[in-house]
Amino acid sequence: MPQIYTRAEIVNLVTSRDDAVERGILALYRLQTQPERTIQQAITVNGEGFSASDAKQGTLYARWILNGNHLAGDSVAHARKIVLRYVGQLTRIANARSIQKLPFGG
């Protein structure tokens, strides 16, 4: 039976593991539309991905991670704060992918 994640479990993952922060950033980035990714802004009101206030920094972090780097120090602390704003979305994503046992995707 697939694991069903609670909001509290996602919060615990994100607060205790830097790799969960990075996976959360990437999961939210994947929800951005292609134009939003390109211009680093949230322009579609769809309740998915980063909001306008986090789109630029979230996109920069996602691109950094996608280039094979890891967040550290102040960057991971700031990214953690961003990711924690989206626990609802991340819980839905994790539960949708729980059959694969990959919280926030792979």
Image (cartoon, rainbow, N blue to C red):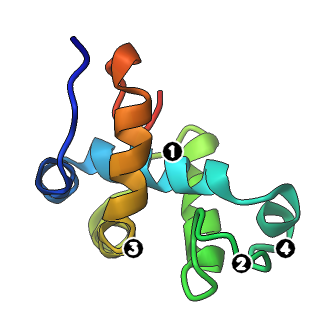
In the depicted view, which residue is nearer to us: 103 or 75? Answer: 103
**SS at badge 1:** loop
Mark pair 3, 4: CA separation: 19 Å
Mark pair 2, 4: CA separation: 15 Å
Residue under label 1: 69
Q: Nearer the viewer, mark 2 or mark 4?
A: 2
**SS at badge 3:** helix
Q: Is residue 63 visible?
A: no
Residue at 79% in and 80% down: 43
Residue at 78% in and 62% down: 37
Closer to the chain start, of discs 1 and 4, is 4
Q: Position of residue 97 (x, y in %)?
A: 43, 27
The image quarter in which residue 85 lies: bottom left
Residue at 63% in and 76% down: 55
**SS at badge 4:** helix
Q: Position of residue 89 (x, y in %)?
A: 43, 58
Q: Is residue 92 visible?
A: yes
Mark pair 1, 2: CA separation: 30 Å
Mark pair 2, 3: CA separation: 18 Å
> What label sits on residue 39 in the rendered view?
4
Q: Nearer the viewer, mark 1 or mark 2?
A: 2
How crowded is the residue under tag 1: few (<14 C-alpha within 10 Å), some, or many (20+)? Answer: few
* Mark 4 residue type: Ile
* Mark 3 residue type: Ile
Q: Position of residue 102 (x, y in %)?
A: 36, 25
Which residue, as the protein is rendered here, is positioned at the far front?
A: 1
How crowded is the residue under tag 3: few (<14 C-alpha within 10 Å), some, or many (20+)? Answer: many
Mark pair 1, 3: CA separation: 18 Å
> What label sits on residue 82 in the rendered view?
3
